[in-house]
Image (spheres, rainbow, N blue to C red):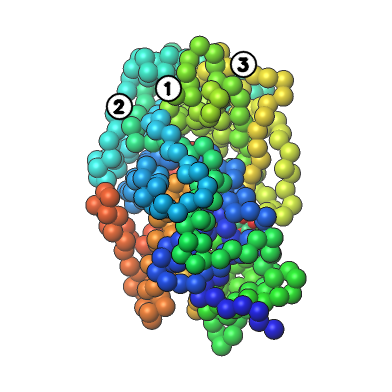
Amino acid sequence: MPIDEYDVIIIGAGIVGVCTAFELSKKGYKTLNIDKNPAVGYGSTSSSCAVIRTFYSTNDASALAYEGWHYWTNWADYVGEINQNDLVTYHDTGCLIYKTQSNNYLSNVGPIMDAIGCPYENLTADQIKQRLPIINTSRYEPVRQVEDDGFAEPTGPELAGGIYFPVGGYISNPQQATNNVKDAVIANGGQFKLNSEVVEIIQQDDRVAGVTLKDGSQIHAPIVINISGPHSGKINALAGKGGNTLIKTRPCRQEVASLKAPDGFDYEHEGPLCADDDVGTYSRPETGNHMLIGTVQPPCDQIDWADADDFDANISEQLTTQVMRQAQRYTDLQIPASINGIVALYDVSDDWNPIYDKSDLAGYYMAIGTSGNQFKNAPLAGKIMTQIIENCEAGNDHDENPTSMELTNIGWTLPLSTFSRNRKVNKDSSFSVLG
Ligand SMILES: Cc1cc2nc3c(=O)[nH]c(=O)nc-3n(C[C@H](O)[C@H](O)[C@H](O)COP(=O)(O)OP(=O)(O)OC[C@H]3O[C@@H](n4cnc5c(N)ncnc54)[C@H](O)[C@@H]3O)c2cc1C
């Protein structure tokens, strides 16, 4: 007993799902985002560190991120004037990455940034210290467990330097960003159905036909997109042949600490985003002169694979480990007895790159495997999904003849085959993330 008809159903109302609805609604599609949560951006998006940086380990991934940065710095232009919620602000901090043996002293950064025309600056350890006087520039690599012999004992007098990217910053409130886009979707006629769990993907005549909700009601649409974040594998499993992909996704548990930055320095306004492979952390300023500390998945840590519906949401020793590692760099960091933090899930693909693609089931699409690093690219993910859908619904085969997208702000042609569900694992991937 169908109750409603839409052009497109989007399973999920995180930042990627809502940006996709925005782009489709601009093209006249009648969209419906369905989410089991009570608010948009309430899933993994709400826990995002929302770091906006431009460096990835391939030209195309870096180009996408550099293009994406333009949306965050021109947010009002992107979402328009209609917003009822306060627009989020992009915090322009710049981004610093340290050169280490494990990242091959960032030897690939210069060629990639030159190729995409993104500015960067090589810095010596002394120059880094001048900009960020609260750091200790000793070398600690390899990353260790806190209880290991040699933890916090320098392995070298000085870091090998770093690379500073003036283009880089963060969004303090990722859920609010999602609300901003939601308002823009509604202004275009798009709709949202919250507190509603999809339990079935309906197929008819070898094509997707809609979804069934947990309360038994059905909603029909000729196009359904899986943008369910860490539940992506479970939703694909409901889609029959639509869920067949060579690249798989699975949830990975993460902890991020929040604590006061060292005294005596305006870290909130002067501190850059930092990726520190030497101690295995990434960090960024947060309002109230706070510091967020995440992990870059050093080899000595086991990846904490999880079940999206059954994982430990309590903070653990891992949080303390991340803070202790970071305290090697910021020796004046005051570590409280009880550290605040969050636990959340990444939706990790086999090569830590996203899947933005069609599927083997007509009308069923997916924007998944965002691997802890696609908040920054969400506006572009929406455009990519819209281009793929328009292309496929016009009768073209995106597997045989994948299209490209023009990244107009930076002048780059992005082959969309990069995001194929059936690509070969990208061996150039770092297989980790720094936001
Ligand atoms: C701790 C952490 C730090 C991060 N830091 C950064 C960063 O610094 N920079 C960056 O660029 N990216 C970062 N990311 C990644 C980024 O936040 C994600 O890539 C992005 O938020 C994914 O958005 P999404 O819309 O795809 O998924 P989500 O926000 O997870 O939304 C998916 C939605 O689908 C819904 N859903 C699932 N199953 C169903 C169902 N059966 N029925 C109905 N609804 C369903 C969920 O309720 C959820 O709301 C981070 C992620 C985490 C977890």
On residue 334, the disc is: 3
Three-letter amino acid code of the residue under disc 1: Glu
Q: Residue at x 37, y 79 (%)?
A: 394
* Residue 378 in view (yes/no): yes
Three-letter amino acid code of the residue under disc 2: Asn
On residue 435, the disc is: none
x, y percentage for residue 274? 45, 29
Q: Is residue 76 left or right of residue 238?
A: left
Question: Rounded to the nearest whole Å, what is the CA distance between mark 1 and mark 3?
Answer: 19 Å
On residue 122, the disc is: 2
x, y percentage for residue 398? 39, 72
- Residue beneath disc 1: 270
Tell which tag, 3 or 2, sits nearer the viewer: 3
Q: Residue at x 34, y 36 (%)?
A: 167
Q: Residue at x 46, y 72 (%)?
A: 29
* Residue 429 in view (yes/no): no
State which quarter of the image contains the N terminus. Answer: bottom right
SS category of the residue bearing label 1: helix
Residue 336 vertical placement versus 391 (above, below): above
Characterize the local packing of mark 3: few (<14), some (14-19) or many (20 or more) Cα atoms within 10 angstroms: some
SS category of the residue bearing label 3: loop
